[in-house]
Image: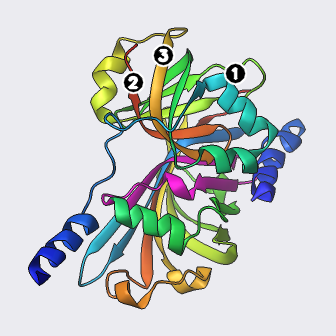
Amino acid sequence: MISIGLLFVLILYNKPLSDIKKSKADITLSAQDLIDDYSKDELLADKKYVNNIIEIKGDIFKITADNGNSIIAFKNINGESSVLCHMLPEENLNVLKLKKNNPVIIKGICTGYLLDVIMVRCVLVNN
Amino acid sequence: MKTGYLILFIFLFVNQLFSQEKYLTKDGYISFFSHSLVEDIKADNNQVVSIIDTETGEIAIQLLMRSFLFKKALMQQHFNESYVESHKYPKALFKGFILNFKEIDSQNSDTEIKGILSIHGREKEINTLVKVEFADGQINLSGDFKVEVADFNIKIPAIVRNNIAKIIKVSFDLQHKPYKK
């Protein structure tokens, strides 16, 4: 009994980060709405979005690379800030097929707002 | 932490009139490492914003605590919810100077950074060695320093006290590009 309990504790303790690809999004919205919400009230937007799996839709503004991982930035028609989606490395091949202005759906975890809204561990969602 | 953003904003735009020499990164790297007899814990943050004013050597660094990624889900959850309380203090901020910035060249690339680090609502003066490299029009800063968990009023529960070091090593690698508006 104790060993089963201990095993359970060990499994729970060593549980890896959740699989974004398999997880269902908590919130679905457009990239523009996400930026607008953050521009209006950062604290309120943090409460709503941070630490949730979010699925956002929009047109690509820019694709950059950082240490071999790609970062997709969305357009913002109302200002300078963007949504920066830091993609998981396994998405690299799929990201290579994308270009500026392509419409995409991206799922990831929102961590908050610096100069842009930051999304981490992002994956592409197929239409 | 609204003020943190304000400081960064002022830093970015207000003294634009006086100098055009700003270097920026939005995907800088900062990690921390805790070594204990029980286990080693490492977390990486690849979303660090950092701005250098090359006229004055002034530097401002900002990051989101929730952007630190751990290997284990439970560690990340405890870090954010219980230790650094990311819901209350979502950002860490460093504001300071790269000393003797104007004298740095390829032969003489080591200098010091001095400034104030704010984490978990507490401020602490940091003074650390930094390697400065000018390459491909970029300014790269790298180095590491140690912080004491207790200095930032971060409380570690007794049950995991042996799992988490009292002194944490912070490493940084920030590659700034010229900032164009």
| Location of residue A31 in the rendering, given as x and y in whole percent from the top left corner | 61, 25
Q: Which residue is mark 1?
A: A76
Whether the magenta-drawn stretch holds residue A100 is answered as no
Say few, some or many: other residues with alpha carbon within 10 Å of mark 2 (under 14 / 14 to 19 / 20 or more): some
Amino acid residing under circle 1: Asn
Whole-angstrom CA distance, mark 3 to mark 2, is 7 Å
Which segment is the magenta one?
A: B43-72
> In this picture, is B152 found above or below A43?
below
Amino acid residing under circle 2: Leu
Which quarter of the figure is the C terminus of chain A placed in?
A: top left
| Location of residue A21 in the rendering, given as x and y in whole percent from the top left corner | 33, 33
| Location of residue A84 in the rendering, given as x and y in whole percent from the top left corner | 55, 32
Mark on residue A124? 2
Residue B12 visible at all: yes
Residue B88 location, quadrant: bottom right
Query: Which is nearer the N-term, disc 2 or disc 1?
Result: 1
Q: Which residue is mark 3?
A: A104
Residue B36 is left or right of residue B86, and the answer is left
Instruction: Give the secondary structure at mark 2.
Output: strand
Discs 3 and 2 share one subunit: yes
Chain for disc number 1:
A
Q: Residue at x 52, y 49 (%)?
A: A51
Residue B163 is left or right of residue B44, and the answer is left
Chain for disc number 3:
A
Discs 2 and 1 share one subunit: yes
Q: Residue at x 60, y 79 (%)?
A: B152
Q: Residue furthest bottom?
A: B158
